[in-house]
Amino acid sequence: MTKKRLQQVQNPKPEEPEKPAQESIAAPAEGPIYSPEASRGPRALLLYSLPLFICLGITYLAPDILSSFLGTSKPGSSGRVSGFNPKAIVADVPKQKQVVEAFKYAWHAYERDAFGHDEYHPLSQKGSNLSHNGGIGYMIVDSIDTMMIMGLEEEYERARNWIATKLSFEREGRHSTFETTIRVLGGLLSAYHLSSSHSHIGEPDPIFLEKAVDLGDRLLSAFETPSGLPLPMVNLATMEGISDPDNPGLVSTAEVSTLQLELRYLSELTGDEIYWRTGEKARVHPNVMHLIRNTLKTPLAPVFLSFRHGHFVLSEIRLGSRGDSFYEYLLKQYLQTGRTEPAFKDMYDSAMTAIHENLVQTTPSGRLVFTSELQPVRGYDAGHEENADWRRIPKQDHLVCFLGGSLMLGATDGGNQLDRSLFSDSEKADWRLGEELIKTCMATHNTKTGLSPEIAMFRTPNDPDWVVQNAPSDWYIKGLKGHKPPLDARYILRPETVESLFIAYRLSGDQKYRDWGWQIFKAIEKHCKVATGGYSGVVHVDDPEGKVELDDRMETFMMSETLKYLYLLFSDGNVLPLTDIVFNTEAHPLPVFNPTIEPNFK
């Protein structure tokens, strides 16, 4: 799919209207406003002292006047962030405490009703497992590092004891390779990394690594395919990969390319390259990412591949389900190993450029910027997606809301370059798009509950008559005319918007991101909190009559991601700095490291 081909879509990108002035992002610069040179003599120092004290007085009594005079900005104004240091961020302790109380409210209900089970149903006050013969620690392992970050020692000790004495992966059933890796393997590795601060000897707790190695060995069986692409499911007890009966012969792009942060770190910890190389023996390609790079014809990837033949197949291009974390992990794999694998950055940069050129649209009002999906409308020979024609669909999953923060993280080189006056043109464009996408994601919270739907449709200049006559001016939920609420209208406690708010705040210091995060937290508290304990998803975020029906399901990512990111949003800047940590796609913090295993993706 050439760039020219990608742009030949049936719903071409309209000419964007002139955008209104953007809200501010800059944070106050660190250090003194003025400092005389050390080489000046005492007389010169005395002469300079008076202006210095005047400036300091104005800063204290009337900071707006000084900002206007110097042309600098305060938090919330536009312009570059010169000298902004995330470590100067101060915690909002009262809000942090409320988030911690929400976590305890969720955890204690689960612990009371379903401890050890993979899933929790707070209305029914019971748990369920992914396997008929026991759980694999979905809820406990996915949540334990949040307890460590929040300093919940008693809860942590009970969870750790269960992992040490009860957690077993001898479980029959069809376990998702992707979900098990990001939630359980990622959770164990993160707990291992963080556990040194919970040990009286200052060393990581070996139980977490022991369990991670056991699980990692079992997951490798999913890679036993002709192409080396992992199967979507695995029987952990028999160590056999399982194909998806709903998508025979296929695996999704996001799921096969969102295992690498976890497997690479496991290799780094153990010294065993097998996890990093992901079963390279007798394979045509050394590992999954080599295969993807060698077979991908465009920077934007269709959402399905054939695990038998090892190439992409005719399918949608989207940044939501089955596509999202492919792009997220391109950047994070580059950052994880200290920028030793520039090929990941090259792929990421090309993908972001293609997103700008082919997926980004603006609503006719000019108020909201969103990303669309591309749907193939004509077939092509296997492996030749460049010959397809594509139709643009103005649809954006809530999952896509990770992208705003990710773009800003990439623009700042993982938080290492915060002076936007030094940005390249592409970095400036990524930063601006990140800001706009976060604003759009917040706009989708403009519902009766203040919660965002699972999927939002956006207005375009080519809307059909029924949309023009019935839909609001910028975005809407599809299918509201039916007798039952559509699945698009639900909110299942997803974290993607607050994830971006956390990243954006850490990189900018702009108070609006904290304000928006608090707005979401209060909506969750009001509408998702179950009277008997725990939290539940909402069936319809914008019911015309204002009814709020709960779905009796507390997803594990409520405690592993949503509440963790909210806590970090209100923490001080020294907690898990973005320059030292990469968060996996389930919000498990893994360290940036200099690899002792020679990277082969260069």
Image (tube, rainbow, N blue to C red):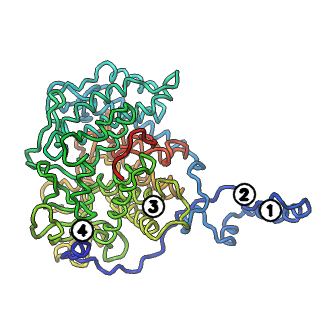
Residue 85, relative to residue 362: is it above or below?
above
Q: CA distance from mark 2 to mark 1?
A: 9 Å
Mark in the foreground, 4 or 2: 2
Cα–Cα gap, marks 1 and 3: 35 Å
User: What numbered label is drawn on residue 394?
Assistant: 4
Q: Residue at x 14, y 54 (%)?
A: 484
Number of residue marks: 4
On the image, the x and y values in percent for residue 400 come to 31, 57
Closer to the chain start, of discs 2 and 1, is: 2
* Neighbour tally class for label 3: few under 14, some 14-19, many 20 plus, Cα within 10 Å: many
- Secondary structure at numbered mark 2: loop
Of the numbered discs 1 and 4, the one sitting upstream in the chain is: 1
Depth check, mark 1 against mark 3: the one in front is 3
Label 3, label 2: how many angstroms apart (C-alpha)?
A: 28 Å
Q: Identify the residue position indicated by label 2 in the image.
A: 32
The circle drawn on residue 411 is: 3
> Residue 227, which numbered label?
none
Amino acid carrying mark 3 in the image:
Ala
Q: CA distance from mark 4 to mark 2?
A: 49 Å
Residue that label 1 marks: 52
In depth, the one of 446 and 252 nearer the eye is: 252
